[in-house]
Image (cartoon, grey):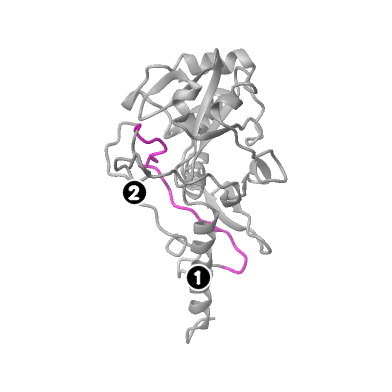
Amino acid sequence: MGNQMDRLSHLSYAEVPTVDPNGVDAEDGPRIGVSYIFSNDDDELEDGCAVDGSDKDPNQEEKQYDQRDEVECAVYNRDECIYEKSAKSVNLEVYSPENLLNKCKPGDLVEFVATGQYPHWAVYVGDFQVVHLHRAEVKNRFLTDASQGRRCRIVNELYKFKALGQDMVVQNAMEQVGLKDRELSWRNSECFAAWCRFGKREFKMGGEIRIGKQPYRLKIFMTGKQPHVLEFQSLEDMIMEKRRNDHLGRTAVLRELAAHYSRMEEIKSEPGAE
């Protein structure tokens, strides 16, 4: 879009606008999610950088990726489930890049994961190579180089859309190699890779008009409780929120939600609250 506005900082769940203008959620009602219309996420780090962007300490051991800290969730477009990530629905096992190469086929979507980082997505195009959106440029690299030492897995089954043919997925990816900065039509590596595989304009910046009702619902699964639900006007905004949660990890997200629910209880118990 070429808009150079500063990136919007994300609000915590306690600060996210609610459906009710008075600031109180209706009982069991969904909450309206933040719009990321001028925002990108920094899902990639420069080689040799720590999670906060500073130089890595070469003597510091990396935190082992813990699958138990994954945020399990589902996404609905109105009544249709279009995405689901849970241990019950898909295989979430991660592998070393070298071991994953034995499982990859051209057109597969690959996700690189590490504790405290945004997940990074790529399209496997064959010959041990991937195409991915990295630091505001679409690049063709060896999978092992693109991983930057992160664990990885094939994630073809997370989105429920019908995939394009294998050759078309690879063609979509290869034709974008070299695009950068204002030439780009995707906010992050996940939107780019998913567009290559499914060909849906909703993965592109501005692919949907943000007016009217919020047709997308992000359900965050909470152990022993009802899912927490956020509504969004576009798939793009929903993906940004989902990726933010992946970046934080399950423990931090549940802590945020607990603080939100505690605040809602305080508001309800205040004098004059209905």
Helix, strand or loop for disc 2: loop
Could you tell me how many numbered marks the image carries? 2
Mark 2 Cα within 10 Å, few/some/many (few <14, many 20+)?
few
Foreground: 27 or 6?
Answer: 6
First in sequence: mark 1 vs mark 2: 2
The image shows residue 272 at horizontal and vertical percentages of 48, 85
Bounds of the magenta span?
26-47
Q: Which mark is residue 24?
A: 1
In percent of the image, x 57 and y 18: which residue is there?
169
The residue pinned by badge 2 equals 8
- Is 6 contained in the magenta span? no
Alpha carbon separation for disc pair 1 and 2: 24 Å
Q: Please name the amino acid that badge 1 sits on.
A: Val
Question: Is residue 112 toward the left or the right of residue 87 in the image?
Answer: left
The image shows residue 22 at horizontal and vertical percentages of 45, 70
The image shows residue 18 at horizontal and vertical percentages of 48, 62
Instruction: Using the image, determine if residue 84 lies above or below residue 132.
Output: below
Foreground: 21 or 12?
Answer: 12
Q: Please name the amino acid that badge 2 sits on.
A: Leu
In percent of the image, x 46 and y 41: which residue is there?
118
Mark 1 Cα within 10 Å, few/some/many (few <14, many 20+)?
some
